[in-house]
Amino acid sequence: MLYFGCWNGAGHFLHTSDGRSVYPDRARMLGCPFTAGQLDGLFTPRNADQKEEDTELVHVHGWTVLAMWDRSVDNRPGSNAAFLMPGMYDRDLMWTAAERIYPQIVRRLRAFGARQAGLDGQKAGS
């Protein structure tokens, strides 16, 4: 599984589980049909308000992509994230794999999405 998005700071890149950036040559070696530039915003949910709690699951080129809007690190409109894995999987399996492989990223995404939705008792944007 690969992760596309911000790791510790602004800047959307493709990452392995140890946080290393995956550049196009390495992505090809890993069999990934996408580069970071190709992934940016391509599979995100098609909602005009870009709600972080919405996700989009896509099967393309033999890979499963779970994509979402994400302003947990980079608060600019259009900021997004995605988990990618070779094979065809459902949303639950993708979240389970992401939680196991990228626990710190999933915690951050879920905490921010819950805050934006007002599910944590705090006001959105606080």
Image (cartoon, rainbow, N blue to C red):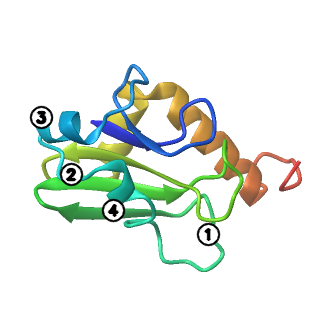
Name the residue type under label 1.
Gln
Of marks 1 and 4, the one in the foreground: 1
Residue neighbourhood size for the residue with mark 2, other residues' Cα within 10 Å, grouped as few (<14), some (14–19), many (≥20): some
Q: x%, y% of residue 106?
A: 51, 36
Residue 50, numbered label: 1
Residue at image position (69%, 58%) is: 76
**Residue 90 is at least partly visible in this image:** no
Give the residue number, with chain letter if any, for mark 3.
Answer: 29
Q: CA distance from mark 4 to mark 2?
A: 9 Å
* Marks 2/3: CA–CA distance: 22 Å
N-terminal of the pair, mark 4 or mark 2, is 4
- Mark 4 packing: few (<14 Cα in 10 Å), some, or many (20+)? many
Q: Secondary structure at mark 2?
A: loop
The percent position of residue 111, horizontal first and vertical second, equals 67, 40
Q: Nearer the viewer's eye, disc 3 or disc 1?
A: 3
Name the residue tied to disc 4.
57
